[in-house]
Amino acid sequence: MRLASYRFDDRVRVGIVGDDGATIADSRHAGPLVDFFDPAARPRLVAAAAAAQKLDPARLTAPIPLPPAFLGVGLNYRDHAREVGRELGPSPAVFAKLAGAVAPPYGTIVRPPWSGSLDYEGELGIVVGRRCHQIAAGDAPAFIAGYVVVNDVTMRELARPGTLVLGKSGPGHGPFGPWLTTADAVADPHALAIRTWVNGELRQSSTTAELHVGCFELLAWLSSILVLEPGTVIATGSPAGSGAGFTPPRWLVPGDVVRVAIDGLGFIEHRVVAEAPGL
């Protein structure tokens, strides 16, 4: 099932996206999407829904507009580790993206005037469905509401330990969506093709089979330390091919269009714009 946060005529409500991604039905539920993380609640959502209408991508908001936490991990793809010539440790580095980074699945990415190294990173995102703490990897699937496509936009000048949260949290630098694909609709999150294009040029082409720490192990590890609330978004890492991986690096500039797609989950797309004075 595909569940979206969508701006219908009067306000944002939960929408049920058609299998082809081209239509959406108004559920008439104005509460958050998290209300339907429990599969047992979804039949009443469907029963109350209006007839399907054409989906306007511009009306989609981030599926979880204000996640309780937005976490990411670094160096978690084997092909990326080979690309940068680094060894993979037992667990990846962890960082947080602040609330201001959350953005809709279609729109713009702002490049600050001082940043000359704005980068893209296509990623699979996990959305936590139930409060979890100290869970086992074998139990993790029951705690996942679904999956989203993420672009972990990064200002590389600040991508160092003392300022990493700043480098990851620029305004709108954490777009995700286009909707939540529920976990029961994803047969294997570790067998999904993931691709990123910049101006139509394929830059990243990999599969989640390249993940070093898989989705379930990652959720278990994070929950061994943190209490993860429903709606928490976890970006699982990016494969080879980000701008930093080229020689010389290929940074984003105003006018560039970035598309990130994951098989079965859809795609998100953004145009890079220069930050206007005073924002």
Image (cartoon, rainbow, N blue to C red):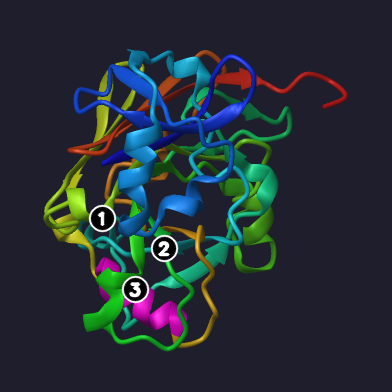
Pointers 2 and 1 in contact (C-beta within 8 Å): yes
Tell which of 269 and 179 is nearer to you.
179
Residue labelled with disc 3: 218
Q: How many marks?
A: 3
Residue labelled with disc 1: 183
Vertical arrangement, residue 58 with respect to residue 185, above or below: above
Question: Which one is earlier in the sequence, the residue at label 2 or at label 1?
Answer: 2
Question: Which one is earlier in the sequence, the residue at label 3 or at label 1?
Answer: 1
Please give the range of residues in magenta: 213-223
Disc 3 to disc 1, how far (Cα)?
A: 16 Å
Tell which of 247 and 37 is nearer to you.
37
Tell which of 149 and 241 is nearer to you.
149
Disc 2 crowd, CA 10 A, few/some/many (<14, 14-19, 20+): many
Q: Residue 68's x, y, as percent?
A: 61, 60
Question: Which one is earlier in the sequence, the residue at label 2 or at label 3?
Answer: 2
Q: Is residue 168 magenta?
A: no
The type of residue carrying mark 1 is Ala
Find residue 129 and name its label. 2
Pointers 2 and 3 in contact (C-beta within 8 Å): no
Q: Residue 244's x, y, as percent?
A: 42, 44
Dot 3: element = helix
Q: Is residue 222 left or right of residue 42?
A: right
Inspect this view and state whether residue 257 appears. Answer: yes
Which residue is located at x 39 percent, y 82 percent? Answer: 221
Quadrant where the N terminus sits is top left
Which residue is located at x 39 percent, y 22 percent? Answer: 50
The type of residue carrying mark 2 is Gly
